[in-house]
Amino acid sequence: MARYFKKRTENRGLPPGSLVFIGTKKTEQPTVEYIAYNTEELAEREFIKIEDVPRNDPERLQWYNITGLDVVGFMQDTQQRLSIAPLAMEDVMNTGQRAKFEEFDDFAFITLKMLQFNEESMRVVSEQVSFIIKESMLITFQEEAGDTFDAVRHRLRNAKGNVRKMGPDYLAYALLDTIVDNYIYLIENLGEKIDDLELRVLDKPNEEVLNMINAYKRELHFVLKVVKPVKELMLNLIRSDTPFIGKKKTLPFYKDLQGLVVHAIESVEAYRIVLSDYIQLYHSTLSTKMNDIMKVLTIFSAIFIPLGFLAGVYGTNFEHLPELQYRYSYFVFWGVVIAAAMGMLFYFKRKGWL
Amino acid sequence: MARYFKKRTENRGLPPGSLVFIGTKKTEQPTVEYIAYNTEELAEREFIKIEDVPRNDPERLQWYNITGLDVVGFMQDTQQRLSIAPLAMEDVMNTGQRAKFEEFDDFAFITLKMLQFNEESMRVVSEQVSFIIKESMLITFQEEAGDTFDAVRHRLRNAKGNVRKMGPDYLAYALLDTIVDNYIYLIENLGEKIDDLELRVLDKPNEEVLNMINAYKRELHFVLKVVKPVKELMLNLIRSDTPFIGKKKTLPFYKDLQGLVVHAIESVEAYRIVLSDYIQLYHSTLSTKMNDIMKVLTIFSAIFIPLGFLAGVYGTNFEHLPELQYRYSYFVFWGVVIAAAMGMLFYFKRKGWL
Amino acid sequence: MARYFKKRTENRGLPPGSLVFIGTKKTEQPTVEYIAYNTEELAEREFIKIEDVPRNDPERLQWYNITGLDVVGFMQDTQQRLSIAPLAMEDVMNTGQRAKFEEFDDFAFITLKMLQFNEESMRVVSEQVSFIIKESMLITFQEEAGDTFDAVRHRLRNAKGNVRKMGPDYLAYALLDTIVDNYIYLIENLGEKIDDLELRVLDKPNEEVLNMINAYKRELHFVLKVVKPVKELMLNLIRSDTPFIGKKKTLPFYKDLQGLVVHAIESVEAYRIVLSDYIQLYHSTLSTKMNDIMKVLTIFSAIFIPLGFLAGVYGTNFEHLPELQYRYSYFVFWGVVIAAAMGMLFYFKRKGWL
Amino acid sequence: MARYFKKRTENRGLPPGSLVFIGTKKTEQPTVEYIAYNTEELAEREFIKIEDVPRNDPERLQWYNITGLDVVGFMQDTQQRLSIAPLAMEDVMNTGQRAKFEEFDDFAFITLKMLQFNEESMRVVSEQVSFIIKESMLITFQEEAGDTFDAVRHRLRNAKGNVRKMGPDYLAYALLDTIVDNYIYLIENLGEKIDDLELRVLDKPNEEVLNMINAYKRELHFVLKVVKPVKELMLNLIRSDTPFIGKKKTLPFYKDLQGLVVHAIESVEAYRIVLSDYIQLYHSTLSTKMNDIMKVLTIFSAIFIPLGFLAGVYGTNFEHLPELQYRYSYFVFWGVVIAAAMGMLFYFKRKGWL
Amino acid sequence: MARYFKKRTENRGLPPGSLVFIGTKKTEQPTVEYIAYNTEELAEREFIKIEDVPRNDPERLQWYNITGLDVVGFMQDTQQRLSIAPLAMEDVMNTGQRAKFEEFDDFAFITLKMLQFNEESMRVVSEQVSFIIKESMLITFQEEAGDTFDAVRHRLRNAKGNVRKMGPDYLAYALLDTIVDNYIYLIENLGEKIDDLELRVLDKPNEEVLNMINAYKRELHFVLKVVKPVKELMLNLIRSDTPFIGKKKTLPFYKDLQGLVVHAIESVEAYRIVLSDYIQLYHSTLSTKMNDIMKVLTIFSAIFIPLGFLAGVYGTNFEHLPELQYRYSYFVFWGVVIAAAMGMLFYFKRKGWL
């Protein structure tokens, strides 16, 4: 749960605007994946030194996908070479950021989190992605290299869909769409697991089930914490007047995306209610079972403890105990025992305990 | 509960605007039911090939009711023949859509869900319906052929009410009214079942009752998930400036419909509170019964366990046990036993346990 | 609880605007009570045929109080004779209506519910009342004849207060005031019963108390469902620009009434919280009692079961059981028993169970 | 809890504007305390007849503090002598009023409640105070004579602070400030009592503690019901354009007061959450104790009931019971008993019950 | 919890604007720490007499950091020497203030609380800090001297970051940033402790764990009570038109800060939900354990109580008890006993209790 904050302690006391990496070190070697394209052609290269990266290409749109936020020197060089405002760069490197959209003088800035569910540890893990959308340039920052953007790369290379024909705002949209699709896929996935839990709650309400409910609750809580600010981000983006996102051509796609985010949030909340209902169900089932157990205990005790006393009475060694001598005493005793047991059973039957 | 999402996985990575069916395959053979009418006459036909469907009839209003969303080729042909924007068509075919109203350049678009309660499986099932309202044309898309719209068809054929005199916006209203009426009928139906449950909760709080409460809760939750966005849809529609819905003549009907949707939502929420109260009642009843059970157990134990011990004492074989020889020991023993039992009973009486 | 909806099933499939009675049949014979008055004089008559009812009286204000919503023919005649828009008439006859205020071309329309508490069945019952306020005419529709409006009739006849001096809008206000006063009286009445319940919850938390809490909760829920839309009605009425309610002279009274409705709603909600607290209290009291019961059981069992075992040991028939022969064994045995019991009691004392 | 409403039943059916006292009769003799002052001088008198009270003093500001709302005749005279609108006077006399601010043609009207905590009955009692602020006159109405306003009287007499230099709006502020200070004092007082409860909940969760939690909850609920409308009152007052409260000179004080009211409400709500946590804590503590009790019961029963059975076996009188004759049987028997007990203890230890 | 209010009782009845210290006395000796600086130079001194403090320095920005709110005389002198409005000074000295931003004629006023977690007492303690931002002067008031502002002092002395180049508004921002950073550090710290609690809840749900959950809940509640008004403060500050905070140059920093405060509040609320889930988990775990305990008890009782009765029967001393004489009775008896026990075990197995 310490996921809710990445330690901001590292930069306590530092003046604002200082570049400090806040998060868990993930990469060994920073890389810049570089794709330059227009409707006719596409060039693709990978760099490990920021000095080698081409700066500006008037003919083509450029996408820089940068990994290695934790290498401060590399990031400083990147900031200068691609002329990014320091405040934005600080946000890129603070991986404990809330998702947000911000307008700068010469670019639009988006930062949000990608989510992945680790089946083994039953934990949702997040990775921060930031977008800098300039006139004819898109710069993306990831904590780790990964395959999330492969589908978009594929579409770029094969010139499928609109992606080659439109600007960096559309490319950013396409990447964001992939991220939001991933949210939904993850929620679906969690949702199915949660659905499967219902039978186990009703059938075998034990601590393992309880732990699982609790774990899913915690993870959904975390997903919500990540996805909710994305809705705000989208609203701010749509309401903004930024010149870096095309009002006519690209904005409708962002609006569509916003609808998807709302849908995702609603579904998470629906599942959270489902889990709360499970907990209630768990308790109810347990109480019902407890009642059954207590009935069994009470029936046995209430029948046999008095009878045990009766047997005890005739087991006493009083010298003058008249019943002991009668010939049929033993059989009368059994008769009384059986009658008493019958009486109790009848009483419990009437109480509805049998 | 996986109902909250239809798998969006199928189109992960595809560019937006690709036509993909998302949902459960329900039809074998796509059909187009075609009704063309004006105040004087009405013609009705059914087609299975989209090429045969008449395109435009300047004299008459046209209603195309199309089933077979899952046949992608057929849908693509439909899109082109009836000139529908691809983004709208994508929404038509994604049956995991939230209800929404959207304005396009040459039509108004509505998508929402019809609901039906399956008595056997105790599940509410939904079917997506989409409306495309053009100048003098209404296109509706259903997942399956059904009898929901029969009442409207009947009114059309018999020229009952306003339906023949007014435009496709009114026809759409009439169909939507049928759908919302169905919501209310379903909620009423569920509501009566829920009402009947109260006595069982009080009388026999067992796991079956618990399961039923839970099932109804889940279904109402689902109904709410479907109906709530319809309210938004209605608000957006009423606030919009779309030229495809008559401000003066038709809008008041839509406003009326919106009131009905609000009423439906409020009722679902009222029943949800009722069910929450049942759960609480279930627990309270169970606790009360548990208390009764424990009282019986405690009374029996507290009386007979000490007496059993007493009998045990006189059952010991100590050689020197003076009481055993006295002539009236046995009767004194019984006297003590009865007095002790009486004392206990009096004590429990005073405690209010009897 | 099926009170939340009156069956709308009857008019499924019918075109909107058809007059259908929705509700429970209550009257045998429709009647029109007719009062015409001005500051100088007042005439009062009762009719059972709508054709006999005077249509328009330029000199006097007219109040038509109509009972018998369930006689469709009579209502149709009424609609025509008093020229009421069909949509309003449909709402008058659908007794499952939410309270609402609506403006029509030639009148203002109000519909809401009167409430009454049936002491015997512990149920709040509602009756729909509708108001049509015209220039110099007030038409009211009730499901049943009743004495609710008697105080106003009395004031009219005796020319007490403003009622004779002002228009039909003021008369409508006076009647609405009576209805809202009745709400408050009913809530007060329920509230006192609820207050009396507290002691019983603390004293004797049994199923009967539980049922009563539940019943009151359900009734308050119903009252809220009825009264809440009245607040909306009032707000809409006050905000509207309808010419049928005097801005200067009458509106302040309506505003006052609105404050009263808010007060009523707040009180219902206060009592609902009180009832929720009772349920919590019920559980807490039950848990406390259960704890007491378990302590008694445990104390008795923990003392006497081990002692019973000890007695059992000396009741065994082993041939070589040395303790049995010693002269003072029996007394030593009792000593041990008493010491053990004392020890246990001391232990339970320290645990705070005694 | 019937405190939420003062009986409005008394004026059912009466025309609005009739003067009726609604509340509990508290005074014997109505009095008018009269203070007239300007920066130079101050005159103070007390009257019991309204005819003797001076009407208008062009030189001085006048404060009339009137007690005796329940003497209708006296109030009617007061209304006429001091020319107060009947609707305001009706509100003054209905002590079941919600706090409100209202503007009249020739005065501003404020009504709210003073609160006092009765330590003995553990009940918060309220007294209604109304303010009529005219050009150079302040009229206050109290249910009972009391010492609440003494501090302000003192400041007036000794010309301390601003009170002698400013108008009746400031005097009203000073009195309101006293009332709000009293709210805060009362909440503090309750809060300290509530804080002291925590240890008792953890230590001895019995019915007495439960009753106290419940009582405090009820009282805080009541306080909230009284104080919340005061916030609204303040907002309305600040937003209003009334000429009777000085925009520049006095309004900042009222704004300050409003902040205080918000603070009071927040604190009540904080304490309500604290009490809810106590209830939860109560249950948790009780459950934990119950678990402990059950462990003791189970340990004793599970050890000694089987051993009792074993002893019983060797207490049987079967003629052929081989073990009885062996010389060391009895010692073997004890060995088995001790081993079994040890085994059980070890088992419970491992289960973590010891 | 009395932390929610500092006693306002001290100034009951006093006219507003009187300087009274409300809070806990913390300092012995009031001090004024004085730093005057511009981009070129910085002078630093400490005073204990307010008369020695320099008043105005046209060349340099001045920061007065004042400790010793509880020495009324000293504060009165300060107020006059630095010409501060009395209403602001009253707020400075009332340490029970809600955080707020207020505009005065010649300065902007901010008051809020610093937080610190005392590990030993498990309590969050607060200290009030107030800011008075004038044209070229910043006055800060602290309850106690402390090291919170050391980082900023350090930056000032070493001319690091913007702090020397910008006005007193930026200096105030830098100090506020330190305070908010401290909030986040504290929440992180509490959050980690809370995370560590989860295992203990699942493993050993005893009263100690319960107390800790409760303690953290209370502390988070307190943190929220302190931090929430800071969000309001920030909003008011950003929306205000005060000339004392630079619109262009400094406001963006305040906006950034506001985002941080929102983040802090969201995290506190996330942890509160976590704690509520723990309580639920605590109960669920306890119920599950209770169920296990009851099963053990029931199994032992249900098997051995009936068998004990059986043994009792053959321990009776009836003269005519035929079974006793048969040679193999004893072995048959054991057979029956074992069979019965087996039967019970099988029954419990099938019930899922084993």
Image (tube, coloured by chain):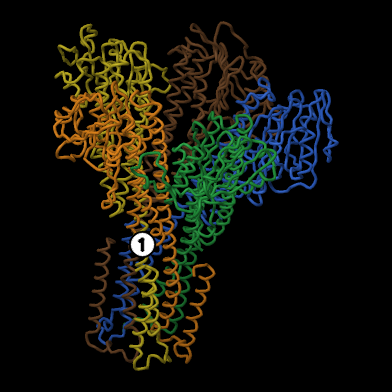
Chain colours: A yellow, B orange, C green, D blue, E brown
Q: As displayed, is residue A264 above or below residue D30?
A: above
Q: Which residue is mark 1?
A: E294
Q: Is residue E71 left or right of residue D195?
A: right
Q: Which residue is painted at 40% across and 69% down in the image?
A: A351
Mark 1 lies on a secondary structure that is: helix
Q: Nearer the viewer, residue E188 or E339?
A: E339
Task: Assess disc 1: are there few (<14), some (14-19) or many (≥20) residues with their C-alpha within 10 Å of its C-alpha.
Answer: many
User: Visible in this render: residue C317?
Assistant: no
Q: Is residue C319 left or right of residue D258?
A: left
Counting from the top left corner in percent of width and height, residue D223 is at 60, 42
The chain under label 1 reads E
Q: As displayed, is residue D184 above or below residue D106?
A: below
Number of callouts in the render?
1
Q: Is residue D133 left or right of residue C169?
A: right
Q: Nearer the viewer, residue E73 or A115?
A: A115
Counting from the top left corner in percent of width and height, residue A67 is at 24, 21
Counting from the top left corner in percent of width and height, residue C37 is at 64, 40
Q: Indicate the amino acid at tag 1.
A: Met
Counting from the top left corner in percent of width and height, residue C101 is at 50, 36
